[in-house]
Image: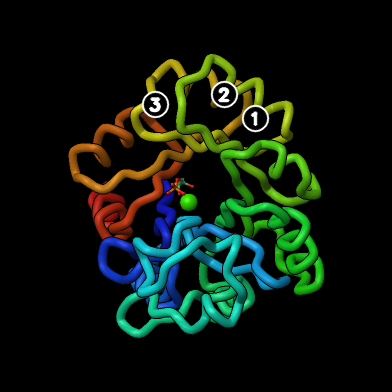
Amino acid sequence: MICFGHRGASGYEPENTLRSFKRAIDFGCPWIELDVYLVDDHIVVIHDEDLSRTLNGTGRVSTSNFSYLRSLDAGKGEQIPTLEEVFTLVDHQCGINIELKGPGTAAAVGKLLASTRYPKDEILISSFDHHKVALMDPDWNRAALFEKASSEYVDRALALHAVSINLDRHLVTEAVVVKAHRAGLKVYVFTVNTKADLQHMDALAVDGVFSDFPDRVLAMQDKH
Ligand code: G3P
Ligand code: CA
């Protein structure tokens, strides 16, 4: 069961900040997960469209300009990072799952990955908006995210040539995992934080979990 540091190590540090990603890397997390929007041709890393939960600002990502976003405090003095800054920080120490949230992100991320010649096995692209996933070059590892129950997880992922279905933890059953594995798909589950939930996912033989507390996942693996 591999670990994706959800928005970095967001149980400990301000989510989706360089500080949070560094903490996940320091824990030895093999993957981090982050969320992106496109603002003034910059790919910015933030989860919510509304700025008020994680920043000392107001308004929306889509109606803000880049310099305003960069003037805000994302917690502990951190700025909203750009995806390029995350690449520099990570420096191939872990994989990066880029979740496409905002309009225009598929093309912009594709362009950046191509220009940086990013290694394909260090990137996983995902989105709840499967049209965005379909826009990415199929050479990139891609995942279909689901937050609502459906009988079509596997069919939709296969149609997208995805490598995995990424499911809300409440949607995961043994039957879903077996069906996905038979189709050659991995099953990655979000967001799994408690010991009981981690053990439950392990028992269901999922392939990976997104956790705000990557150290908890890694500690569990050490005991295996
Ligand atoms: O990609 C897994 C998970 O991050 C999806 O949900 O709302 O945390 O972006 P959310
Ligand atoms: Ca996410």
**Helix or strand or loop: what does disc 2 sit on?**
helix
Three-letter amino acid code at the position of disc 3: Val
Q: Report the residue marked by disc 2.
A: 153
**Helix or strand or loop: what does disc 3 sit on?**
loop
Q: Nearer the viewer, residue 187 or 65?
A: 65
Crowding around mark 3 (Cα neighbors within 10 Å: few <14, some 14 to 19, many 20+) is some
Q: Report the residue marked by disc 1.
A: 157
In the rendered view of the protein, which quadrant contains the N terminus? Answer: top left
The answer to whether mark 2 and mark 1 are in CB contact below 8 A is yes
> Rounded to the nearest whole Å, what is the CA distance between mark 2 and mark 3?
11 Å
Q: Residue 67: x and y, percent? A: 58, 82
Q: Residue 98: x and y, percent? A: 58, 57
Q: Residue 66: x and y, percent? A: 61, 76
Instruction: Look at the picture and state if 176 lies above or below 30.
Output: above
Q: Is residue 103 left or right of residue 49?
A: right
Asked whether residue 31 appears in the rendered view, the answer is: no
**Helix or strand or loop: what does disc 1 sit on?**
helix
Q: Disc 3 beta carbon < 8 A from ligand 1? A: no
Which residue does the image show at 65% across and 29% down from the upper left? 157
Q: Residue 161: x and y, percent? A: 73, 34
Q: Is residue 221 left or right of residue 129?
A: left
Count the marks: 3
Labels 2 and 3: the sequence-earlier one: 2
Q: Report the residue marked by disc 3.
A: 172
Which residue does the image show at 39% across and 26% down from the upper left? 172
Which residue does the image show at 47% across and 64% down from the upper left? 59
Which residue does the image show at 80% across and 49% down from the upper left? 137
Q: Is residue 183 left or right of residue 35?
A: right
> Rounded to the nearest whole Å, what is the CA distance between mark 2 and mark 1?
6 Å
